[in-house]
Image: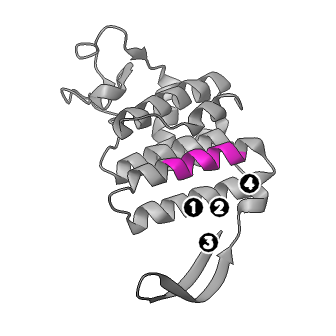
Amino acid sequence: MVADVQLYEGRSLDVVQQAESLASYGAQIAVHYDRYTAAHAMVETADRLNEAESTPQQYLLLVGGLRTLAQGVHASRSVLDSYLLRAMALSGWAPGLGDCARCGRAGPHDWFVAQLGGTVCNDCAPAGSARLRPETGDLLRALIAGEWDAVDAASGPATASASGLVAAYAQWHLERGIRSLSLMESTR
């Protein structure tokens, strides 16, 4: 739920003077398991990113993601992946999806390494790096840019691959796991 609340600063606790409901998304999200788990992962991520300081942009991104989940017009996992990429970008951890994230060589490139910041060239890719198919790279760029026609048209294998890379990237930069993502895995 999104509410406009007016508070009065009391001695030990703030007092709610006025509250007005602006939007309610809970009912539309809670009746669908995939939407519910995606929303939970989004809120958990927002909580972790905003432990030190919250920003209006992070808040608006979360509200927009929850609204999109409630509407159900896009796959829940794609909404979550787009949210994670954008939230990481707002926090200063935008993945490099064009040029090599390590040496800057012009891309696109065939390898993705979360620890190095995104896609990397053949020379910079360490052993065991994830191979990035062109369709998956295109999907990652569409997710961060909000190009929903391209996201919705992506194949199942590309979507699954992109989701795994996004989850690894977000959890690496948060320096801990997002517990809700394990529940999201079972909805694929």
Mark 1 element type: helix
The residue carrying mark 1 is 64
* Labels 3 & 2 near each other (Cβ < 8 A): no
Q: Is residue 131 above or below residue 161?
A: above
**Image coords of residue 16 (percent x, y):** 56, 86
Mark 2 lies on residue: 67
- Spatial separation of the CA atoms under disc 4 and disc 1: 13 Å
Prevalent SS, magenta region: helix
Asked if the residue under mark 1 is in contact with the one under mark 2, i.e. CB atoms within 8 Å, the reply is yes
- Tag 1 or tag 3, which sits nearer the N-term? 3
Residue 19 colored in magenta in the image: no
Residue bearing mark 3: 2
Q: Which element is circle 3 on?
A: strand
Label 1 neighbourhood size at 10 Å, few (<14), some (14-19), many (20+)?
A: some
Span of residues in magenta: 35-44
Question: Hey, which quadrant is residue 175 in on the image?
Answer: top left
Q: Are marks 4 and 2 in contact (CB under 8 Å)?
A: no
Q: Nearer the viewer, mark 4 or mark 1?
A: 4
- For mark 2, give the secondary structure: helix
| Image mark for residue 166 | none
Q: Which mark is residue 29?
A: 4
Q: Residues within 10 Å of mark 3 (few under 14, many from 20)?
A: few
Closest to the camera, between mark 3 and mark 1, is 3
Please tell me which of labels 3 and 2 falls first in the chain: 3
Between 46 and 82, the one nearer to me in the picture: 46
Which quarter of the rendering shows the C terminus? top right
The image quadrant that residue 130 belongs to is: top left
Q: Is residue 17 toward the left or the right of residue 134 in the image?
A: right
